[in-house]
Amino acid sequence: MSVPAYPHPIIAKEGWIFIAIFAAVSLVLTLFSPWFSLIGWLLTLFTIQFFRDPPRESGSDDELDVLCPADGRIIVVEKTTDPYRHQAEALKISVFMNVFNVHSNRIPVTGTVEDTNYYAGSFVNATLDKASEKNERNAVLMETANGQKITFVQIAGLVARRIICYAKKGDAYKRGERYGLIRFGSRVDVYLPVASEVKVSIGDKVKATTSVLARLPERNP
């Protein structure tokens, strides 16, 4: 089952209700206390910038290149095991999104969704290693046309309380297509074949779709 490309409205559709609420409250406050209403207008502006959803061009035409699924900063690059694939050996790359980053999440590789798994959890600081195991999270397992298997996981953070994922088992996606969003600060973990070639380093600032995280091996082991 193919998934239609998400039309980029500049402001993510998930944020329209919040922007409308803050703007309405601010208008009412303006009638009674113009100075106090400034707080409301600042919150409205913050909400607009948080839910911005600009279109992005791919950072590579090579299908073996894994595109970044989120805006933010690289906080983990390590060899480990993929807990969503029976502890198979994997290369893990994690991106931390602060409240000022774009929070729209994009598909890193072209392929078909094998499964999605949601886990309820806590809300510790998303920069901590234990966030990958303890926090609320949603994992998407995907297989590429040549059999490469990768997993990418949306993880709620200290402030984030809502993971939105539209990907479903059987959906076919192209790299860079939008598949979800996490509200108000969060993290995305990407598990790749262990033989993948890393293209980023810890501390690098990255952008969804534009940045390349790694290059998959030529053939599936």
Image: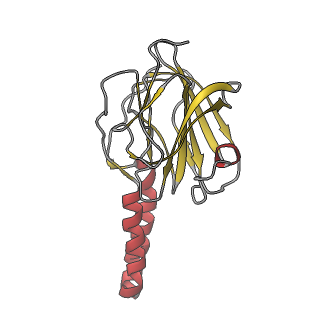
Q: What residue is at 44 percent from the left and 32 percent from the top?
A: 107
Up the image or down, 68 lies above or below 187; here it is above
- Left or right for 155, reference 25: right
Q: Quadrant of residue 36?
A: bottom left
Q: Position of residue 144 (x, y in %)?
A: 48, 18
Q: What residue is at 42 percent from the left and 78 percent from the top?
A: 39
**Which colour scheme appears in the figure?**
secondary structure
Up the image or down, 217 lies above or below 201; here it is above
Query: Which of 4 and 132 lies nearest the eye of the viewer?
Result: 132
- Left or right for 86, reference 105: right
Q: Position of residue 10 (x, y in %)?
A: 31, 49
Query: Which of 3 and 29 lies nearest the eye of the viewer?
Result: 3
Q: Position of residue 87 (x, y in %)?
A: 70, 27
- Left or right for 124, reference 171: right
Q: What residue is at 40 percent from the left and 65 percent from the top?
A: 46
- The quadrant the C terminus occupies is top right
- The count of marks equals 0
Q: Position of residue 126 (x, y in %)?
A: 59, 53
- Left or right for 31, reference 95: left
